[in-house]
């Protein structure tokens, strides 16, 4: 018998077979009592583990008390603050372009050949500085000829006066006819008129000679010369005159911009209601900055509004003037201007992060004394120093949520934590 056949249900040796135990009986006994597998009873251990888990879940485990029930969660925390109240001036901003107060196209008053250029392209020139010289020799000859004609005609006047005096004496003694006397008087008067014409010709010749030296008409920066030496200059007072150069003044300087018809109408209504100073009658302050500048470093004032609205664009032209001692502002340069849209007044300010959009309405969430959230419809205005102006819907004593709006629901409770609304003044 093998060792496996001599083991009982729990591994003990089987008793020896009796007299009536044959192979068949042994097979039947084996069939009735099958041999268990060797090793740990995994099924028993599994059942024991499940029972232990159930006992532990029901609090019947040994040495492990039942878990206590967790307390209810506190309302979500949000940051709240009262709206900020400040005395402000609302500003309107526009894009515009700088322009020179004085703009001169340098052209010659006489024709001739260009012989001299007395400036460097782009330099700053003063009024009266010599810029160009046109060949003066023909005009010097014209002046000499005019002066000679004047001297000749002055001698004719002297002779005519002598003839007039002689014929006057002869006519008194009736030695000369009256007709001859009248003829002599007319000749003398004609000679005087000729002298006056010669004097005017001399003045014109002197002017033409002076015009050969082209000078700067204003202080400013001159552009590049448009004609080189040796070219024929067409001058005069009419026709297609030759452009020699251009000069623009720099200090002070204009800033031109366009405002819409609705903005202009709003200003007019505010002036009529006494809420705004009329820029046509007063020097309303204005501030401008260039595209690479922060804040509003250049201060000036409004000095002009056009007399009509452009029908094609629906805008009206306005202008401000600024000092430009450092010559940093250049004609043709673009910039941004702001002008006052109101007189100083008290305003309520809140951050944009505190505003919720509900279709076409703007809403802020207020918190009552017991922590209940209630929505409030507001009418927002423009921004001021990083905050939004509230036209209506809020009071300074209201408490609004400025952080944590995603955790707030209308009618629900929240845990308010104090915060502070601060403006961000521009440089």
Image: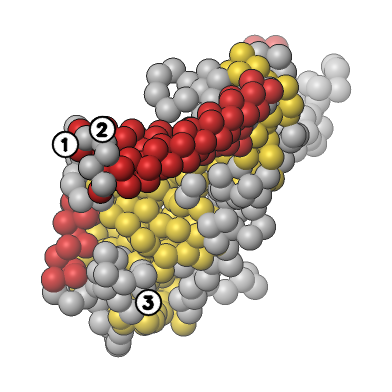
N-terminal-most mark, 3 or 1 = 3
Is 5 above or below relative to 277?
Answer: above
Rounded to the nearest whole Å, what is the CA distance between mark 2 and mark 3?
94 Å
**Residue drawn at 31 percent across, 82 percent down:** 346
Give the crowd class for mark 1: few <14, some 14-19, many >=20 residues within 10 Å: few
Q: Earlier in the sequence, mark 2 or mark 3?
A: 3
Q: Earlier in the sequence, mark 2 or mark 1?
A: 2
Q: Give the residue displayed 27% in from the left and 39% down from the top.
A: 175
Q: Is residue 7 left or right of residue 175?
A: right
The label shown at residue 88 is: 3
Residue 190 in the figure: left or right of residue 248? left
Q: Residue 5: x and y, percent?
A: 78, 21
Image coordinates for residue 273, horizontal then vertical, percent: 14, 74
- Residue 155, horizontal then vertical, whole percent: 52, 36
Residue at x-position 32% and y-position 52%: 318
Q: Which residue is mark 1?
A: 311
Q: Residues within 10 Å of mark 2 (few under 14, many from 20)?
A: few
Residue drawn at x 63%, y 60% as measured from the top left: 325
Q: Is residue 69 visible?
A: no
| Viewer-closest of 133 and 100 | 133
The N terminus lies in quadrant: top right
202 to the left or right of 192: right
Q: How many marks?
A: 3
User: Vertical placement of 366 versus 225: above or below?
Assistant: below
Element under label 2?
A: helix
Q: Residues within 10 Å of mark 3 (few under 14, many from 20)?
A: some
Residue 73 image-quadrant placement: bottom left
* Viewer-proximal residue among 108 and 357: 108
């Amino acid at each position: 018998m093998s060792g496996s056949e001599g083991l009982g249900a729990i591994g003990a040796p089987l008793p020896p077979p009796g007299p009536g135990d044959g192979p068949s009986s042994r097979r039947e006994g084996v069939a009735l009592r099958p041999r268990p597998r060797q090793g740990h009873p995994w099924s028993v251990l599994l059942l024991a583990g499940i029972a232990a888990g159930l006992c532990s879940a029901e609090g019947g485990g040994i040495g492990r008390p039942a878990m206590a029930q967790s307390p209810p969660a506190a309302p979500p925390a949000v940051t709240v603050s009262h709206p900020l109240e400040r005395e402000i001036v609302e500003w309107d901003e526009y894009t515009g372009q700088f322009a020179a107060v004085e703009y001169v196209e340098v052209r010659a008053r006489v024709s001739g050949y260009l012989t001299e250029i007395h400036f460097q392209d782009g330099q700053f020139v003063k009024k009266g500085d010599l810029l160009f010289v046109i060949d003066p020799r023909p005009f010097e000859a014209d002046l000499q000829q005019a002066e000679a004609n004047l001297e000749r005609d002055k001698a004719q006047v002297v002779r005519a006066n002598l003839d007039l005096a002689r014929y006057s004496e002869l006519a008194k003694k009736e030695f000369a006819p009256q007709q001859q006397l009248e003829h002599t008087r007319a000749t003398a008067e004609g000679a005087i008129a000729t002298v006056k014409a010669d004097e005017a010709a001399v003045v014109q010749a002197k002017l033409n000679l002076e015009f050969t030296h082209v000078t700067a008409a204003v202080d400013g920066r001159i552009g590049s010369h448009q004609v080189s030496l040796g070219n024929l200059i067409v001058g005069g007072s009419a026709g297609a005159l030759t452009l020699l150069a251009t000069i623009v003044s720099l200090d002070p300087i204009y800033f031109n911009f366009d405002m819409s018809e609705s903005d202009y109408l709003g200003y007019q209504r505010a002036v009529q209601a006494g809420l705004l100073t009329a820029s046509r009658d007063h020097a309303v302050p204005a501030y401008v900055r260039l595209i690479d500048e922060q804040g509003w470093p250049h201060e000036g004032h409004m000095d002009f509004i056009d007399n009509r609205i452009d029908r094609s664009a629906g805008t009206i032209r306005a202008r401000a003037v600024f000092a430009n001692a450092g010559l940093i502002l250049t004609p043709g340069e673009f910039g941004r201007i702001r002008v006052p849209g109101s007189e100083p007044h008290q305003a309520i300010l809140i951050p944009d992060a505190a505003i919720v959009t509900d279709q076409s309405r703007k809403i802020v969430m207020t918190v009552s004394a017991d922590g209940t959230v209630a929505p409030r419809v507001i009418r927002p205005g423009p921004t001021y120093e990083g905050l939004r102006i509230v036209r209506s819907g809020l009071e300074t004593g209201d408490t609004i949520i400025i952080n944590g709006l995603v955790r707030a629901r209308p009618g629900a409770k929240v845990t308010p934590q104090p915060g502070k609304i601060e403006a961000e003044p521009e440089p």
